[in-house]
Amino acid sequence: MTEQLTLAVDCGGSGIKANVLDDAGTAHAPALRVPTPYPLPPELLVDTIAEIATRLPGAHRATVGMPGMIRHGVVVHTPHYVTRSGPRSRVDPELAERWRSTDIRAALQARLGMPTLVLNDAEVHGAGVISSSGVELVLTLGTGLGAAMFDGGRLAPHLEWSRAPVRRGTSYDTYLGEPERRRLGDGLWSRRVVAVVDGLRPVFWWDRLYLGGGNARRLSPTALHRLGEDTVIVPNSAALVGGVRAWDLPLP
């Protein structure tokens, strides 16, 4: 069987990173990263990904992870790309309307000229790290908070519970996001992460919890000890490896 090369794209609130990987998850070039442009209508995201693809080796298929609620490749909601100048800035109603119900998978597939899979970014991240045994929860700590759950390797329907209030009307997304980490410092922010994890345990009853995203490496040694043996810190590069493995996921 001919080896498949996958263009894996991780779309974040502050940057868009991509690479081409083989079936084993081996990169065929150095990863490329560009700042996420704002304001960002759907057409500009497609153009940005297509431009990055021209600077990487050719691929047979593409996987794109992006923030928000994505159902069957269609955007139900995306939190950052509807804003005027990026995360925590004012929402632009016109952008929000343009993103709503956009079939981003179809748009990317037509532009890239290859089969394309579009999932929530935490789901793609999870595909790169799960063992496919038991209930596994993936939390990504970055611009905001991403989440994905798997049962026996099967992806559960996505829930944007990171938007739920956790304290005085503040959402989990804001409570654990990058602006709060910068304001508090790594030590106090790490204590918040531990408190949230402890609060979620009786809700999810996971067998394994994976903490990834760009800020997982900022957790303090004390926090890592308190998180316990059922918690694993995974590298941010898992988001690109997950682009390969996502094609084998049983999807909801």
Image: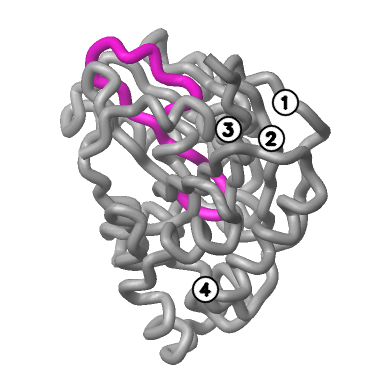
Left or right: residue 225 versus residue 9 is left
| Residue 219 visible, this angle | no
The residue singled out by tag 1 in the image is 27
How far apart are the two marked residues, 1 and 4, measured between alpha carbons? 27 Å
Q: Are marks 1 and 2 in contact (CB under 8 Å)?
A: yes
How far apart are the two marked residues, 1 and 2, measured between alpha carbons? 6 Å
Q: Which residue lies at the image location 21% right of the left edge and 43% below the top edge?
A: 157
Q: What is the three-letter code of the residue carrying label 4?
A: Pro
The residue range painted magenta reads 127-145
Which comes sooner in the sequence, label 1 or label 4? 1
View extreme (front): residue = 1
Q: Are marks 4 and 3 in contact (CB under 8 Å)?
A: no
Label number found at residue 20: 2
Residue 132 within the magenta-colored segment of the rendering: yes
Which comes sooner in the sequence, label 3 or label 2? 2
Q: What is the three-letter code of the residue carrying label 3?
A: Ala
Q: Secondary structure at mark 1?
A: loop
How far apart are the two marked residues, 3 and 1, measured between alpha carbons? 22 Å
Give the number of the mark in front: 3 or 2.
2
How far apart are the two marked residues, 3 and 2, measured between alpha carbons? 24 Å
Q: Nearer the viewer, residue 212 or 158?
A: 158
Give the number of the mark in front: 4 or 3.
4
Label number found at residue 216: 3
